[in-house]
Image (cartoon, helix red, strand yellow):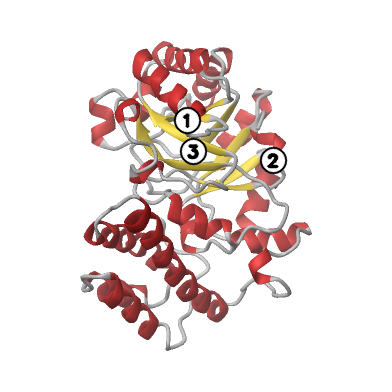
Amino acid sequence: MRNVTDLNFPLCLAPMVGLTHVALRRTIQEYMPQNATTHWPTEMLNSRRVPGENLKTTPETLRRQEETNLVPQILGNEEKPIQESVIRLVNEWGASGIDINMGCPVQKALKHNYGVSLMGDVDYAAKVVEMTKKHSPVPVSVKLRAVGSEKSVPELIKFVQRLTDSGADWITLHPRTAEQKRRGTADWSQITELKKSLKIPIIGNGDIQVASDVTEMMRLTGADKVMAGRALAARPWMMWQLGEELGFECPQIFAGQKAPRTADEEGREYGRMLLKFIDHCEEHFMREAGVSESVTMRKIQFFIKTTHVWLEFGHALMAKASGCKDLQSLRLAVSLFFENEQRMNAKTELRQ
């Protein structure tokens, strides 16, 4: 992969802590149209830890052999750990690109001057890009948030221009400030202005919940590509829906079928998807990595906690899943819950 624009599909998954792991990627990849290509992230990886980890058994770096166009996201600000992480991720793990996190607003990242705190000092941020690019034989991207001030757009453009000058090959912008976190509406106009002002590819992120949001963001902002997070985890067949609209062949495992569209169809598909997701978690975390059943359960329950809000009675599913102690009881609870027709909301508040 020379750059993100070499890939032919306009939608990609966002890197999300606790969610963007091998099981979720596999689940979404099963809904990818035939011959569609996009890039795939990991969870946020701490550059201080990667050099000493077993990349084949660490849950955050588990990958399937057949996965391609993987762009792991790293968190860091020191050259030696970044260098060692990049070398291992590219040479041993097979990364096609490296993404730098400048958007994480959690306190743990802020304490170490990681994540969104890098946006407080343009020289500091540019240095992190420069040192990553220096050691990376593959493209380097940056995911960042909006700058929150009255002069936000000019500041943002200047900031990103410095990152570009330091070697960033593309930028992903989530146009909410760190203070907003997931609240409020993403300001897509900032994506528009960034795209107008820069020559490198721009990926837009924020408030993408259904397939039509993807085409609408691209139409309104001129973004080269769109990134979706929790809504794509909840609705992985969004890939299939979008593919239908763009003229791609349906996913191989759904040959001859149409993508679910109605609230009832999507509700049924969520149930089928969730059971497959549970299977993938068991295979990759328990069997391959030797992770305990209790830890695997927590990963699945976190997925349900994040995605159940799109179901009309998702709170009832969450309550049943939270009471399960093992995979057998969880599968039974999910199967029984979806024996009754369930409906899926097109959109919901993104604050949960």
Q: Which mark is residue 7?
A: 2
| Horizontal side of residue 26 vs 52, given as left or right | right
> Label 3 to label 2, Cα distance in Å?
24 Å
Q: Which residue is mark 1?
A: 92
Q: Secondary structure at mark 2?
A: loop
Q: Amino acid at mark 1?
A: Glu
- Disc 3 target residue: 175
For the point 40% across and 24% down, the residue is: 85
Q: Amino acid at mark 3?
A: Pro
Q: Which of the marked residues, 2 or 1, is nearer the chain's N terminus? A: 2
Mark in the foreground, 3 or 2: 2
Looking at the rendering, in which quadrant would you find the N terminus? top right
Occupied quadrant, residue 212: bottom right
Query: Which residue: 54% across, 61% down?
Result: 236
Q: Which mark is residue 307?
A: none
Which residue occupies 23% across, 73% down?
324
Where residue 245 sits: x, y (%)? 74, 61
Callout 3 crowding tier (Cα within 10 Å): few <14, some 14–19, many ≥20? many
Q: Nearer the viewer, mark 1 or mark 3?
A: 1
The quarter of the image holding the C terminus is bottom left
- Residue 239 to residue 11: above or below: below
Residue occupying image coordinates x 34% and y 46%: 59
Residue that protrudes farthest toward the bottom in the picture: 340
